[in-house]
Image: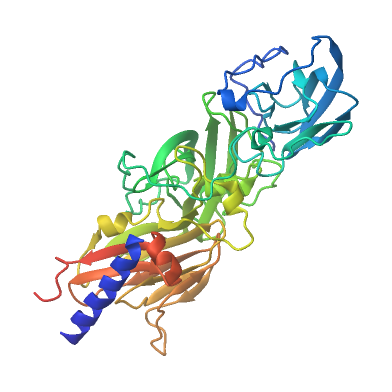
Amino acid sequence: MKRSLALLALLGTLLLASCGGTPATTPLRAARADAPTQPAAQPASNAPAAPAATSDVLGALEIKAVDLGFQPASLNIAKPGRYTVKFTNDGAIPHDVTFPNGTKLVANPKETKSTDVDVPASGLSFICSVPGHSDAGMKGTISVAGSTAGGHNADDHGGPPPTTDVQPDANAPDYTPYDAAAPAALAGATHDIDLVVEEKDMTVAKGFVQHVWTFNGTVPGPVLRVKVGDTVRIHLKNPATNQLAHSVDFHASQVAWNDEMTSINPGEEKLYEWKAEYAGVWMYHCGTAPALHHIANGMYGMVIVEPADGLPRVDKEFAIVQSEWYLGPQGQPASLTKASASAAAPDYVVFNGVANQYKDNPIKIGTGEKVRLFVLNAGPSVDSSFHVVGTIFNTVIKEGVTLTADNPGHYGAQAVDLAPAQGAIVEFTTAEDGLYPMVTHAFNFVGRGALGLFQSGDGDPKK
């Protein structure tokens, strides 16, 4: 009885806290013609400064995009007026140059676009508006002799200042729970798997919607399970309806970074083939620049590679991926500025993509059953101290280092420490009916969504 009361008290505390050979890419669409892009309609507050009295073009300005920056990032002109901007994309992924009044030139790799812009006496700023690119450094200025672009006019930055406080939206749709059950190993020895990139809105916590980038429409992406010796053929597809270039990096593979892991643009697909040669719990993720943003915005998943002879049978298996959300404005991608901070301070730390989803929907297990968890810390930046309250892990396989239940000293494990991109297999058995919280024992994050529950039996230890 004392143990039950203590467990309930601890659970109450946690629940209170929670309230707070290079495969060729296949182009699927034609490149856009080199034509001026018309300015988009903008609110009055974003109207450009009054143009020069004459509409004569005073000269040409050349701007090149590289990954991730502009060359030059600072241009100087002798006087204000109308100039032709010639924009060339020398990078490996699509970029644009966007001015404060909404004028935008979009260019695919090796493509050039041109348009005319009016540069006021105060100068002009420009950015790449592809999500994350401006935050990563794709900003520039056009300065007029005797002035400096920017000044105190926030509109010169081509958009609102960075969001530091995102308010919940009472009308946000409910989140979609992620099924934690681990899949069975795929049959056969060769596996053809489609990974389709989908850019979509997703509720990541109650009241908070982000425009996430996903593999197969979920965060995390699908759990893939194979055995040592298997061949995995990933067909990565980036539909033309997407806005960004994407890629995939399988930590379980041994291939050159500049081979299968290269990015593909919207409308393209490629083959990424690898052989599973080492067992473990492995991460896969998008590696397109800036990789930090693509991971922080949902592009990660788990690969389970079993030994060739498989794993011993247990009663239940679940896959748990810990990760972080750095909230951007409602309906926008996660904030790269927040994610890039030297002292990581995520708005949420979550299991399987959604804050507190397994507190709301406990994972059901049987008392006395052998339970196996495949655990991955996808990060991108915060360590995990994975712990299930009320249990002891009798088996732990972390990055190839093994603790078995039959070890001579009868040692056990209370928590498994996982740096970003590390994985583990843990096993436990519950001693009685009740609720068993799943947390990271870095308790400052439990109140930020890193809390779930295992319901053993009927969940009531008093019966």
Query: Which residue does the image show at 34% across and 67% down from the upper left?
Result: 17
Query: Which residue does the image show at 70% across and 23% down from the upper left?
Result: 49
Residue 88, given in percent of the width and then of the height, sits at: 78, 25
* Residue reaching furthest to the bottom: 409
Q: Quadrant of the C terminus?
A: bottom left
Q: Decide: is 463 above or below 21.
A: below
Q: Decide: is 101 above or below 353.
A: above
Q: Decide: is 86 above or below 431.
A: above
Q: Quadrant of the N terminus?
A: bottom left
Of residues 315 and 433, which is closer to you in this image?
Answer: 433
Q: Is residue 134 left or right of residue 377?
A: right
Q: Is residue 360 left or right of residue 379?
A: left
Query: Which residue does the image show at 58% across and 43% down from the upper left?
Result: 248
Residue 416, given in percent of the width and then of the height, sits at: 46, 72
* Quarter of the view holding residue 458: bottom left
Of residues 427 and 138, which is closer to you in this image?
Answer: 138
Of residues 365 and 445, which is closer to you in this image?
Answer: 445
Q: So how many labels did they put on this image? A: 0
Q: From where the camera sits, is residue 274 visible?
A: no
Q: Decide: is 80 above or below 226.
A: above
Residue 186, given in percent of the width and then of the height, sits at: 40, 47
* Quarter of the view holding residue 81: top right
* Residue reaching furthest to the left: 463
Query: Which residue does the image show at 79% across and 16% down from the upper left?
Result: 52
